[in-house]
Amino acid sequence: MNKVIAIFGDPAERTTPGFVAWLRESKVASVAWLAVRVWVGIMWIQAGVSKVWGAENPSFLHHNGAGVAGFASHGVAAYSWWASFMHSFVVPNAGWIAVIVAFGELAIGLGLAFGFLTRIAAIASLALLFTYVMSGTASVCAFYALCAIIVLATWRTSTWIGVDGIIKGFQQRRHHAVPVAPVEAAPVATPVPELVSVG
């Protein structure tokens, strides 16, 4: 192990480059991360609205999830075990899975767009994109996944402007505004003058 450390150095001593730290912590950079977060959130909202109220509504919320069943049974899965999972689990349960997908996309979009539970929304976004990619859908999934990873990597600044930022700011103000009772100092005993006897 010492030879490996001698060659490559100690990983505990490596520090994050200043530019990367600036990108993750700068309030100026937070505007760019805000734009990424809101944009991918709007894309998810559009997809969710289409499934909940729009043209895709009959395929997802009606007809026993025909949209999900068709996607799962006719998609070109990346692996045979995934295709087996899609045919044996997803197709028979397409009705309730379609409802979860429709409202899940809408919830992910709202969470990202408004910056509420942002990390959970970004992780859910990656999980849903993973299922799409594994099922043979490329389209814009990779770009959405990149945006979700950026939001996760910069969550401190990407959520600065948003509901999470407001909640965090309120918690910080409340934490600093808690009055602390002053500690009373113990009374100092005054020395009694000694009586000097004369004579």
Image (cartoon, grey):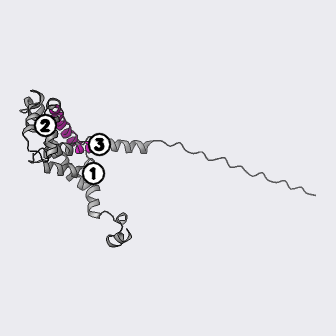
Q: Could you say which is closer to the camera, residue 29 or residue 58?
A: 58
Question: Which quarter of the figure has residue 137?
Answer: top left
Mark 1 sits on what residue? 157
Name the residue: 10% across, 48% down. Answer: 140
Q: Is residue 114 magenta?
A: yes
Name the residue: 12% across, 28% down. Answer: 61
Amino acid tagged 1: Thr
Q: Which circle's residue, 3 or 2, is located before the other in the chain?
A: 2
Cα separation between marks 2 and 1: 42 Å
Q: In which quadrant will I find the C terminus?
A: bottom right
Q: Position of residue 150 (x, y in %)?
A: 22, 52
Q: Which circle's residue, 2 or 1, is located before the other in the chain?
A: 2
From the viewer's perspective, is the residue at label 2 or at label 1 nearer? 2
Report crowding for label 1: few under 14, some 14 to 19, many 20 or more residues within 10 A (C-alpha).
many
Amino acid tagged 2: His
Disc assigned to residue 87? 2
**How many marks on residues?**
3
Question: Which quarter of the figure has residue 4?
Answer: bottom left
